[in-house]
Image: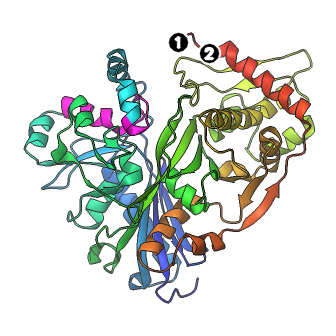
Amino acid sequence: MGNSSGEAILSIDQGTTSSRAIVFNLGGQILGQHQLEFKQHFPQDGWVEHDPEEIWDTTLSTCREAIKEAGLKPAEINAIGITNQRETTVIWDRESGKPIHNAIVWQDRRTASLCQSLKEQGLEGKVQEKTGLLLDPYFAGTKVRWLLDNVEGARALANEGKLAFGTIDSFLLWRLTGGKVHKTEATNASRTLLFNIHTQSWDHELLDLLEVPETLLPSVEDCCSDFGTVEADLLGAEIPIAGIAGDQHAALIGQACFKAGMAKSTYGTGCFFMMNTGERAVPSTNRLLTTVGYRIKGKTTYALEGSIFMAGATVQWLRDGLKVIESAVESQAIAEKVGYQSSVYLVPAFTGLGAPYWDADARGAIVGLTRDSGPDDIVTAGLQSVVYQTADLINAMINDGAASSNTLRVDGGMVVNDWVIQYLADILNTPVDRPVMTESTALGAAYLAGLQAGLYKDFQEIESYWQCERRFEPALEDKQREQLYQGWQTAVGRIKSSQ
């Protein structure tokens, strides 16, 4: 795979279903990689957990294998970057390093009643003003509260300063440095409900509100920082950890969206759309999230984010649930055959609707069926639903006063489908760029580490490495675009619960 001359960067990409490590060269090309899946635990309906020890074991194994595949000695890795599934929450014993409970995953809904109680006390406005977030079980703060209230002895130990809280980045950092470093950075901190995104510090009022002792918390750094050094016996050399960001923020960096108005959309299981809003934290009146995009050299760049629960997962349902396709690849040819003319709409609200609706009680539906409708129409409608939901997010952002994007950069497994990306360009009436390197999340973490290590001079240099594989230009008449999108909005209106 070739020698790095000490300019290789190891990126740890710790995701929801797998841990992955990729070794990049300075140009952002992959020298070696390895990936391992791990078990999902569902102890009760709506509860989702991971075993932190399994996350640690798979992370360590993938790092070792990726370095080996790259044909490098560990000492030839210049720096390490970490990106991670956000909001997933771990509390561990500071002395032994052992977690007190399984990690509670971002998808977990066990704190719904606590969130509802806080809403009924009229506290959501205050929380949103400080954090940019909504009161939802998605975020880490209420998970911390649950662990302290439900794991025997946890609160007493926390009050004595014997426990540590972290999102997955902090937990991995602690383990990689042999328990020497308890830190996080601004993007992961901004997803906890405990961090004030305007003062860039843990907020005592929010800590009191959620009954979280400050002794639990990591210190908060810039995304590029000295995060300590990996213990030599773990990877075979002491390697500095120099960059960390939550997965969607890392993808924003990997896509080189460094100017206000630039946006990326990641299509995996769900879809995460993030727009750079520059130095301004744009408050959302349309139930989007105002978040830290990244923080470099003490300067915070903000972003607006919207989440769609069902993107690639909709295609999985068409394959495994309805069994109308045998593989995701088939869907492109089917949609090309059906085209834009079908009157069928699939609203994939299988676990409720995400942004900008945040309707947990809405459920999926297929609308507009006629005697002529068949499986191909439903498959096409499934693909179209991902595009329409993206349009919902962009319209909400524009209504919030964010600058409209001139182009959209896309990544994730679903973007190999040319038909979907062309439809996206047509419905958004915006050019859509698909990059050569679609591993944007891992690449963003590598860029952050490289910046801190002095391998890159600035964002301008990183931007020069971004390459477009194909640009999809809109080619649909306004009238047809409006009719198609209006049909979607009508379909969504039919399945929304009366909140």
- Viewed as shown, does residue 249 lie left or right of 348? left
**468 relative position to 151: left or right:** right
Question: What x and y, as percent, mark residue 487?
Answer: 80, 22
View extreme (top): residue = 498
Label 1 with label 2: CB-CB less than 8 Å: yes
Which residue is rendered at x = 66% and y = 38% of the image? Answer: 394
User: Residue 414, image x and y in percent?
Assistant: 69, 48
What segment carries the magenta color?
Answer: 130-150
Q: CA distance from mark 1 to mark 2?
A: 8 Å
Q: Is residue 152 magenta?
A: no
Q: Is residue 239 left or right of residue 214?
A: right
Front position in the image: 331 or 430 = 430
Q: Which mark is residue 296?
A: none
Q: Which structural element holds mark 1?
A: loop
Q: Residue at x 55, y 78 (%)?
A: 25
For disc 1, the marked residue is: 499
Q: Nearer the viewer, residue 131 or 467?
A: 131
Q: Which residue is mark 2?
A: 496
Q: Position of residue 149 (x, y in %)?
A: 19, 29
Q: Does 145 lie within the magenta span?
A: yes
Q: Residues within 10 Å of mark 1 (few under 14, many from 20)?
A: few
Mark 2 residue type: Lys
